[in-house]
Amino acid sequence: MGIFDFVKKQFVDVIQWTEDSNGILAYRYPMMDMEIQYGAQLTVRDSQSVLLIDEGQIADNFGPGLHTLNTQNLPVLTNLKHWDKLFESPFKSDVLFFSNRLQLDRKWGTSNPITLRDPEFGMVRLRAFGMYSYRLTNPTLFYKEVCGTRAEYTADELDGQLRHLIIAELTQIFANSKLPFIDMAANQHALATLLTTQMSPLFARYGLTLDNLVVENISLPEELQTILDKRISMNVVGDLSKFSQFQVAESIPLAAQNEAGVAGAGAGMGAGMAMAQTMANHLSTATTPAASQPIAADDIVSTLEKLHALVGKGILTQAEFDSKKAELLSKLN
């Protein structure tokens, strides 16, 4: 090699990575034609670790600190190169930095609904989403299983694989739990704890440690949620017979006040009595499932109060009220 070629030769004396871009898990120090000089300084920060790769084979690894590259702290590389006391300088080796920082706010979710057999609703399709965090803790395993000697490998590239693993495990947990959908919201923390336990070995396979996993929401697709909302509304209404009684009782005074209602349209006493009879019939049907079972006193009193109000509005006569009163009071016996 000529003197000019030697002058052109570049040597690396300082090796460091400042992690100026978020989300990078593995970064290969750019060597090009440069060679590492004997005694070069390798700086590994608190959130980092480093592997030296010699001809595709893992040589030495370094934790946080300032390291001087010589035969004392390159024992594996020295052995691979058959160096004894004579350190060959310069030398070439791939230097891979790994970020050990927590990768926060990683999101997961079901791209398609999960179809499950629900003990209450039958077959349902569920959606779920949440977030998780992890850190790279085993650079050797991550290098072998995931990144190799790529120039860099990011958390975004790994997200797809991790999301698929989470959803697959979540589907199995949902199926085995046999929890009704309506109870899942109350058990989200327990489901997340179980999912974390199940997922930790899968993350470890790639040299990662799962730090936290949260189930934020479990929901039905929109069309099924609409049906569930209607069912909830019916539960809120409760007894439909009593609800009908209430609607009839409320409609009579409103009709009497409205010029276009019962009184204003000239329907007269007959229509008013028919509505009162309808209300009494609703009461009778709802509260006496058998002929021998008396009507509750509270229901009788409530109905009489409403009928008496109709007398005051001129919809019922006193005689009609007395007749209906006697009929209802006889049901108490």
Image: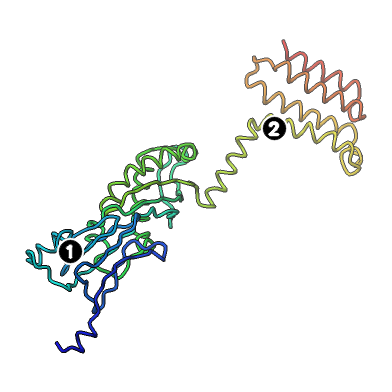
Three-letter amino acid code of the residue under disc 2: Phe
Task: Evaluate if marks 1 and 2 touch, with contact meaning CB atoms under 8 Å apart.
Answer: no
Mark nearest the camera among 1 and 2 is 1
Q: Looking at the image, is mark 1 or mark 2 earlier in the sequence?
A: 1
Which class describes the residues within 10 Å of circle 2: few (<14), some (14-19), or many (20+)? some
**Residue 70: numbered disc:** 1
Three-letter amino acid code of the residue under disc 1: Asn
Nearest the eye: 172 or 42: 42
Label 1 and label 2: CA atoms lie apart by 88 Å
Nearest the eye: 104 or 117: 104
**Residue 243: numbered disc:** 2
Nearest the eye: 154 or 39: 39
Q: Is residue 332 above or below residue 51?
A: above
| Residue 70, x across and y down, in percent | 17, 64
| Image-quadrant location for residue 320 | top right
| Secondary structure at numbered mark 1 | loop
**Position of residue 251 in the picture relative to residue 51 (left or right):** right
| Residue 215, x across and y down, in percent | 45, 46
Viewport quadrant of the N terminus: bottom left
Residue at 26% over, 73% down: 12
Can see residue 30?
Answer: yes
Can see residue 206?
Answer: no
Which residue extends farthest top?
333
**Residue 59: numbered disc:** none
Q: Is residue 243 above or below residue 9?
A: above
| Secondary structure at numbered mark 2 | helix
Q: How many marks?
A: 2
| Residue 218, x across and y down, in percent | 48, 46
